[in-house]
Image (cartoon, rainbow, N blue to C red):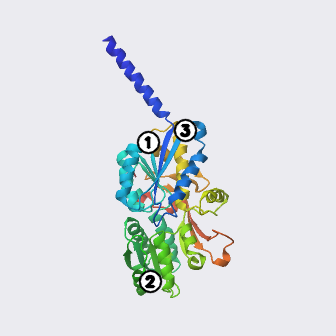
Amino acid sequence: MKQRFSALLLGVALGFVASGASAQDKTVKIGVLTDNSGLYSDLGGAGSTLAAQMAIEDSGLAAKGWKIDLISADHQNKPDIATTIARQWIDVEKVDIFMDVLNSGVALAVNNVVKEKNSILIDTGAATSDLTNAQCSPNTVHWVYDTYMLANSTGQALVKAGGDTWYFLTADYAFGAALERDTTAVVQKAGGKVLGSVKHPLNSSDFSSFLLQAQASKAKIVGLANAGGDTTNSIKQAAEFGIVAGGQKLAGLLLFITDVHSLGLNVAQGLNFTETFYWDLNDGTRAFAKRFSERMKNKAMPSMVQAGVYSGLIHYFKALEAMGGNPHDGAKAVEKMKSMPTDDPLFGQGSIRVDGRKIHPAYLFEVKKPSESKGPWDYYKLVGTVPADQAFRPLSESACPLVKK
């Protein structure tokens, strides 16, 4: 009996030691799952991996005894490839947290794997608002932007300015469908009408037939529910068809600094769109952008996706430090992140809601005329600001099961 009691005490003691060791575990593995070679590579890709590296360096955790590893992979914009990588990373590579995850179809698939495996996803690249609505998860945080915010800001502003009839060019996958759906709701609520839409394949090179249908609709606004290379190609070809010259207005529902750079100010001037980060917004954004650009091969300024990778990781590191170590328990770490206010030089002060939505202001920009630009990458002028508490879907309208009604 005495031997059994001693063994029991030893077991309890070992369990306590193991638990304590776990709490003091100061190892972290970060996986940047992005588009390294396709139509979204310039707004995520190598720049997202660099942003993650900068966050690791700026966190100061290495000097405090932490070991932080960083790996990256190309999901090729294919959900099946992404989920294979995700399972390999979690089971074999022991990745704790997924960053970027550009492409909504990919992000929704990885969201399921992360929840199943109790890992963490900080999505800064995919736009679908379903990640914090019907498909929300205790393991996922959605940073930067989403389709609801884009629709609410850009869509509402354009209807108020007289753009009350719309026709959509929509990327034929989860992101495009969500953006068209959310913008349609905003347009109709504001008293506007949607005259039609046409879906195009991802990574299209020829938009002629789609643009002719938009032109024939005579809608005041041609809403581009696409992104990256698809957006720049449709804008360039719209210019060739004289769509804007003919009196219709293009709405870039999701536009990035890299898109404007690719288009050039002669083509992009006058475009209205919404972003939550711009490199030249304030001293904090400028200081980060200068350091980022110096380390990029093409000297590009950071996109809001890349800025989100940095910002999201900085907050994650703060949460781990507050916990005294890495629990290697995704839901537990995310819960800690939600309990702490967010604050960094790129997005300012904010918070993470119960549904996983990161809250911060959104900015309505207009692309400058060539004569207004004072130098390289000086492309935007600020038209208006949507306060943080108004930019994203209100919890009262949420279908997220984590939200108590």
74 to the left or right of 266: left
Q: Of label 1 and label 3, which has the lower sequence position?
A: 3
Q: Are marks 2 and 1 in contact (CB under 8 Å)?
A: no
Q: Position of residue 45 (x, y in %)?
A: 50, 59
Whether residue 247 is visible here, answered yes or no, is yes
Residue plotted at (38% across, 56% down): 82
Inspect the image, locate mark 3, and give the three-letter code of the amino acid beneath it: Trp
Whether residue 135 is visible here, answered yes or no, is no
Q: Which residue is mark 2?
A: 219
Q: Give the CA separation, mark 2 to mark 3.
A: 57 Å
Crowd tier of the residue under label 3, counting other residues whose Cα lies within 10 Å: few below 14, some 14–19, many 20 or above: some
Q: Position of residue 358 (x, y in %)?
A: 50, 55
Q: Of label 2 and label 1, which has the lower sequence position?
A: 2
Instruction: Identify which residue, 395 or 246, lies in the foreground.
Output: 246
Under circle 3, the secondary element is: loop
Inspect the image, locate mark 2, and give the three-letter code of the amino acid beneath it: Ala
Q: Position of residue 290 (x, y in %)?
A: 65, 59
Q: Which residue is mark 1?
A: 332
Q: Give the CA separation, mark 1 to mark 3.
A: 19 Å
Q: Which residue is mark 3?
A: 66
